[in-house]
């Protein structure tokens, strides 16, 4: 299964799962099966050994960091992530996690920032909105508006545990909301990035 690990724009990505508790309006999964040439729909989720085997096929020295960001939420595969990320660190690479920040709700535990701070150097968290009603309108989480509060707690935990934390929004939310999110990111002590909406 080649789509467990894939290269995109010079970085190496690990695709652990297609599961996700959200159904975001802007999710690329609605319009494409993958990124670039790679079909990222999984027929099964990879094990630690699958990922190790796939990583051995890539010229790892050329990458500055290895990113957990698949066609789904990586923290929905926390147990495999907790094996793969320390392995990557032992190989000498930096690690980044791209997440919706809802791993606490999914895994029913509130210590995930502390846990991952041992092996994740930076985290990019989808903020998407500055208040719960809009978050739910955009992200249509199975957890309802609780998702927004859980995501904010996750952000605080990451910052407190020394993970280099960036919050992101997608540019279709409008200038006023982009600014409100920027202010919220600042208040939370996180970096901030506006992403371009991917369209068909
Ligand atoms: S959180 Fe990410 S993977 Fe999940 S629906 Fe939203 S954009 Fe898609």
Image (spheres, helix red, strand yellow):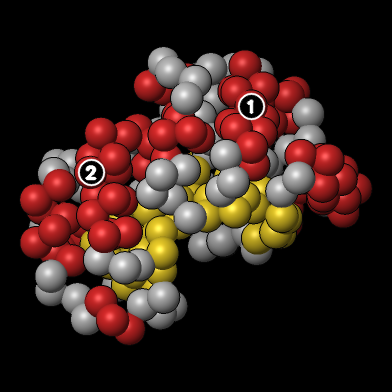
Q: Determine the secondary structure under disc 2.
A: helix
Relative to 92, residue 127 above or below: above
Residue at the disc numbered 1: 153
Relative to 10, residue 195 above or below: above
Do tag 2 and tag 1 residues touch (Cβ < 8 Å)?
Answer: no
x then y, percent, for residue 187:
83, 40
- Whether residue 51 is visible, yes or no, is yes
Relative to 159, residue 136 above or below: above
x then y, percent, for residue 45:
18, 42
Residue occupying the point 26% across, 60% down: 90
Residue occupying the point 64% across, 52% down: 166
x then y, percent, for residue 164:
59, 54
- Whether residue 26 is visible, yes or no, is no
Question: Circle 2: is it few (<14), some (14-19), or many (20+) Cα within 10 Å?
Answer: some
Residue occupying the point 25% across, 76% down: 60
Q: Is mark 1 within 8 Å of ligand 1?
A: no
Residue at the disc numbered 2: 83
Quadrant of the image occupied by residue 181: top right
Q: Please name whichever residue, 28 or 122, is drawn nearer the observer in this view of the structure.
A: 122
Dot 2 or dot 1: first in sequence order is 2
Picture disc at residue 177? none
x then y, percent, for residue 116:
42, 40
Residue occupying the point 18% across, 66% down: 55
């Amino acid at each position: 299964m080649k789509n467990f690990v894939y290269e995109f724009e010079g970085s190496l990505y690990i695709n652990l799962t297609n599961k996700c508790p959200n159904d975001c309006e802007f999710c690329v999964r609605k319009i494409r099966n993958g990124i670039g040439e790679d079909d990222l729909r999984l027929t099964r989720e990879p094990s630690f050994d699958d990922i190790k085997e796939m990583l051995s096929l890539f010229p790892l020295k050329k990458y500055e960091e290895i990113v957990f960001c698949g066609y789904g939420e990586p923290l929905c595969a926390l147990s495999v992530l907790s094996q793969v990320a320390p392995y990557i660190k032992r190989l000498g690479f930096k690690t980044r996690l791209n997440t919706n920040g809802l791993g606490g709700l999914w895994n029913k535990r509130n210590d995930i920032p502390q846990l991952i701070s041992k092996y994740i150097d930076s985290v990019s968290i989808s903020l998407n909105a500055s208040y719960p009603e809009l978050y739910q309108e955009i992200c249509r989480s199975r957890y309802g508006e609780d998702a927004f509060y859980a995501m904010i707690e996750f952000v605080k935990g990451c910052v407190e545990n020394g993970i280099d934390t960036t919050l992101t929004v997608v540019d279709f939310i409008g200038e006023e909301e982009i600014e409100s999110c920027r202010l919220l990111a600042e208040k939370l002590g996180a970096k901030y990035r506006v992403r371009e909406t991917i369209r068909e």
